[in-house]
Amino acid sequence: MTYGHAGAAIARIGTADKTIVDTVAVGVGAGTPAFSPDGQFLYTANQGDTGIRGVVEVRTSDMTLTRTADCGERYISNLAVTPNGDYVVGATNYGLVYLDARTFTPADTVLPKGSGYVALHPNGDTLYLAQRRQLYVLGPKNR
């Protein structure tokens, strides 16, 4: 199964015949999806068409929107999930925001400021943030 986004929805696309199997509305600005380590949930950004700027959680088994995290004034541009599934990390215009995956609330915001693309090393020890002409490499102590 493959996921893609178009407009205000996430679509599940069958890989065998490349047809849309199911969709779920997630709000304007749906970004690149990130998955929980067990694959049960998909996370994507919402840029505020419903008055909420933040992250939405979708249960992958039935494409149901399960939760929305309000991130205030932060515009989330890209997400990654820690290998243990404890945090969803988003690059925002105010820095990196860490959402507690259990409570789905912002737990912390750390610098560097500015949106970009975020990726976590599979072992969870290093977070990479690419912004325009810079690449930041952050260790676990930055959290």
Image (cartoon, helix red, strand yellow):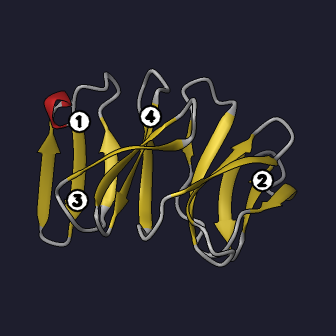
**Amino acid type, callout 4:** Tyr
Residue denoted by label 2: 13
The disc, 1 or 3, on the residue closer to the chain's N-terminal end is 3
Other residues around mark 3 within 10 Å, as few (<14) / some (14–19) / many (≥20):
some
Q: Which residue is drawn at 18% across and 54% down?
A: 111
Above or below, 14 against 113 in this view is above
Whole-angstrom CA distance, mark 1 to mark 2, is 35 Å
Whole-angstrom CA distance, mark 2 to mark 4, is 27 Å
Q: Which of marks 1 and 3 is in front?
A: 1
Other residues around mark 1 within 10 Å, as few (<14) / some (14–19) / many (≥20):
few
Q: Quadrant of the N terminus?
A: top right
Whole-angstrom CA distance, mark 1 to mark 3, is 17 Å
Q: Which of marks 1 and 2 is in front?
A: 1
Above or below, 21 against 115 in this view is above
**Amino acid type, callout 3:** Ala
Tag 2, which secondary structure? strand
Other residues around mark 2 within 10 Å, as few (<14) / some (14–19) / many (≥20):
some
Residue denoted by label 1: 143
The circle on residue 130 is 3
Q: Which residue is drawn at 65% across and 78% down?
A: 49
Tag 4, which secondary structure? strand
Is 51 situated left or right of 65 in this image? left
The disc, 2 or 4, on the residue closer to the chain's N-terminal end is 2
Q: Which of marks 2 and 3 is in front?
A: 3
Above or below, 120 against 67 in this view is above
**Amino acid type, callout 1:** Arg
The disc, 1 or 2, on the residue closer to the chain's N-terminal end is 2
**Amino acid type, callout 2:** Ile
The circle on residue 87 is 4
Pinpoint residue 103: horizontal percent, then vertical percent.
Answer: 57, 34
Tag 1, which secondary structure? loop
